[in-house]
Amino acid sequence: AQKVTQAQTEISVVEKEDVTLDCVYETRDTTYYLFWYKQPPSGELVFLIRRNSFDEQNEISGRYSWNFQKSTSSFNFTITASQVVDSAVYFCALSEIFTGNQFYFGTGTSLTVIP
Amino acid sequence: DAGITQSPRHKVTETGTPVTLRCHQTENHRYMYWYRQDPGHGLRLIHYSYGVKDTDKGEVSDGYSVSRSKTEDFLLTLESATSSQTSVYFCAISEGTVANYGYTFGSGTRLTVV
């Protein structure tokens, strides 16, 4: 079974629209970490955020915000007022404390922001 | 300074030939990883290392071997390349367990097996 599900394969929005990328995870551990990575067209993978399972506070960083809800096992990512530079593939990932050294990546959501 | 570099960036090779990809880090991190990225699969772990000469298999290790003789270098070898190994390969490093520290990724190696 998929540990991390990103059901949205591709999303297109017009510049300045808000967009939310969904991430649903599955774990039996009580201690775990969730991550988001961005992969722009240039191909590199860029770390965006890390959140541990005990911190359900939402986080905002500029136009980016993350909504972590343990009740629904979701860690969604919202981009406000999207820009063309936000066009990328976004990966959500889970790391369980007892497996320590492995990430479970989602299959990614490809976001295209249309000017 | 990138901190982690992969070489080569692009390679085309023939089926049946051995291929070695190199990952070099200047961060002195203990943990190093090799992933492959394929459409519809996201990133999948091939092998990882938790110290010099200490390695372990990941999810998709068949057909691959690794070596780590120095902290800074982690080599991935395709023993006899097949077309199914055409992929983008990413190296990653982590200061500690990824649960606590997350990854820093290299820029990737695009490998085509013809």
Image (tube, helix red, strand yellow):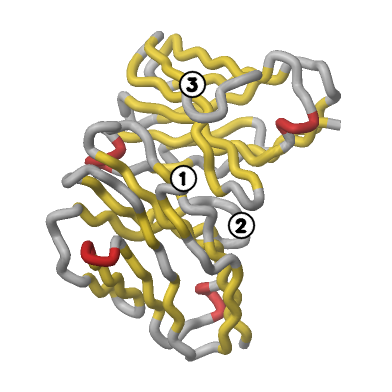
- Kindly identify the amino acid type of the residue bearing the numbered disc 1: Ala
- Tell me, yes or no, whether the two marked residues, 2 and 3, touch with CB atoms within 8 Å: no
Q: Secondary structure at mark 2?
A: loop
Spatial distance from mark 3 to mark 1, Cα to Cα?
30 Å
- Kindly identify the amino acid type of the residue bearing the numbered disc 3: Phe
Q: Residue at x 59, y 47 (%)?
A: B41
Q: Quadrant of residue B12?
A: top right
From the top left corner, tell me how far across and down residue A105 is, in percent. 45, 48
Hey, which residue is sitting farthest left in the picture? A54
- Tell me, yes or no, whether the two marked residues, 2 and 1, touch with CB atoms within 8 Å: no
- Seen in the picture, residue B40 relative to A57 is either above or below; the reply is above
From the top left corner, tell me how far across and down residue A2 is, in percent. 46, 48
Q: Nearer the viewer, residue B97 or A93?
A: A93
The verdict on a common chain for dots 2 and 1 is yes
Q: Quadrant of the C terminus of chain A?
A: bottom right
- Seen in the picture, residue A57 relative to A43 is either above or below; the reply is below
From the top left corner, tell me how far across and down residue A57 is, in percent. 15, 69
Q: Nearer the viewer, residue A75 or B8?
A: A75
- Seen in the picture, residue A72 relative to A85 is either above or below; the reply is above
In the picture, the disc for residue A1 is 1
Mark nearest the camera among 3 and 1 is 1
Mark nearest the camera among 2 and 1 is 1
- Kindly identify the amino acid type of the residue bearing the numbered disc 2: Ser
Q: Quadrant of residue A97?
A: top left
Q: Is residue B1 visible?
A: no
From the top left corner, tell me how far across and down residue B95 is, in percent. 28, 33
Q: Secondary structure at mark 3?
A: strand
In the picture, the disc for residue A42 is 2
Tell me the crowding category of disc 1: few under 14, some 14 to 19, or many 20 or more residues within 10 angstroms, Cα based: few
Q: Which residue in the protein does label 3 denote? A: B74
Spatial distance from mark 2 to mark 1, Cα to Cα?
31 Å
Badge 2: chain ID = A
